[in-house]
Amino acid sequence: MNVIFIVQEVDEQVNTVLDPLPTNATAQQRTTFREAQKKDSKALFLIHQCVDAKMFEKIADFTTSKEAWDTLQKSYGGDAKVKKVKLQALKRQYELMEMKNDETIADYFTRVVTLTNQMKIVEVILLNKKVEKVLRTLTSKFEHIVVIIEEIKDLSKIKIEDLQSTLEAHEMKHGGRNHGKEDEQALFVKFKKYQDDKKKWQKKKESKKGKES
């Protein structure tokens, strides 16, 4: 999260105590204090967005970002050996995570994002692995749409939010249930057409190259 704090220009707030405003403060001091308060509130908001419900309960009553950040570091950090054990446990939980049969796309994405945010707190950055993780662990009813996404899209450029929207649209279209044979066949025909068109285009391209040479 240190990277997030630096980008949002609030890294100073999470590491220093916000001094109270003097009784007879000047106009300049009041302005500086208000700006510091805004940055501190922003940092506290960022921290709230990166923790699960259980951890949020521990920091909900804190009024400064430093208090919340110090608590997070103690909970997720500790000494090097403790941090390593916690990191291994989170990574193991992440690798074993799969979508449940009775789970919606929204609920599954919430679980994935919550866990990866916890891993970031212990200094693990997953970069663009969320998309691959979600596609790899969806239930079988999403198999056809996953194949199409993997064939047509560049996974490294897909935003996690866009993927969620696509999958939720698919989920809504089929009522959140296993779609019937007609739907599966229609999807397969669409994908088969894409593959055939792709092969024709490649042959045409190779033929053109041969003539030019």
Image: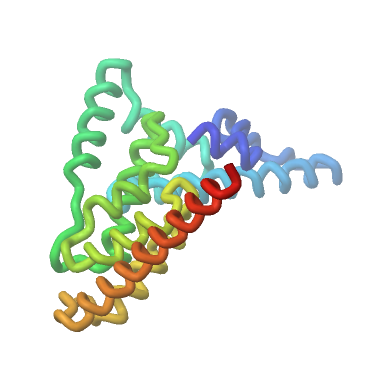
Residue 165 x/y as whole percent: 41, 68
Nearest the eye: 38 or 199: 199
Marker count (numbered): 0
Q: Residue furthest top?
A: 80
Residue at 47% from the left image edge and 45% from the top image edge: 47
Q: Is residue 144 above or below residue 44?
A: below
Residue at 19% from the left image edge and 83% from the top image edge: 182
Left/right of residue 2 with respect to residue 13 in the rendered view:
left
Left/right of residue 43 with respect to residue 91 in the rendered view:
right
Colour mapping used in the image? rainbow
Residue 118 x/y as whole percent: 34, 40
Q: Is residue 108 above or below residue 69?
A: below
Nearest the eye: 199 or 57: 199
Q: Is residue 14 visible?
A: yes
Q: Residue furthest right?
A: 27
Q: Based on the displayed image, in which of its 4 quarters is residue 101 positioned?
A: bottom left
Nearest the eye: 45 or 50: 50
Residue at 41% from the left image edge and 62% from the top image edge: 200
Residue 2 x/y as whole percent: 52, 32
Q: Quadrant of the C terminus?
A: top right
Q: Is residue 164 above or below residue 45?
A: below
Residue at 36% from the left image edge and 60% from the top image edge: 149
Residue 177 x/y as whole percent: 18, 77
Q: Is residue 61 visible?
A: no
Q: Is residue 98 above or below residue 7?
A: below
Left/right of residue 8 with respect to residue 192 in the rendered view:
right
Left/right of residue 101 with respect to residue 65 in the rendered view:
left
Q: Based on the displayed image, in which of its 4 quarters is residue 100 positioned?
A: bottom left
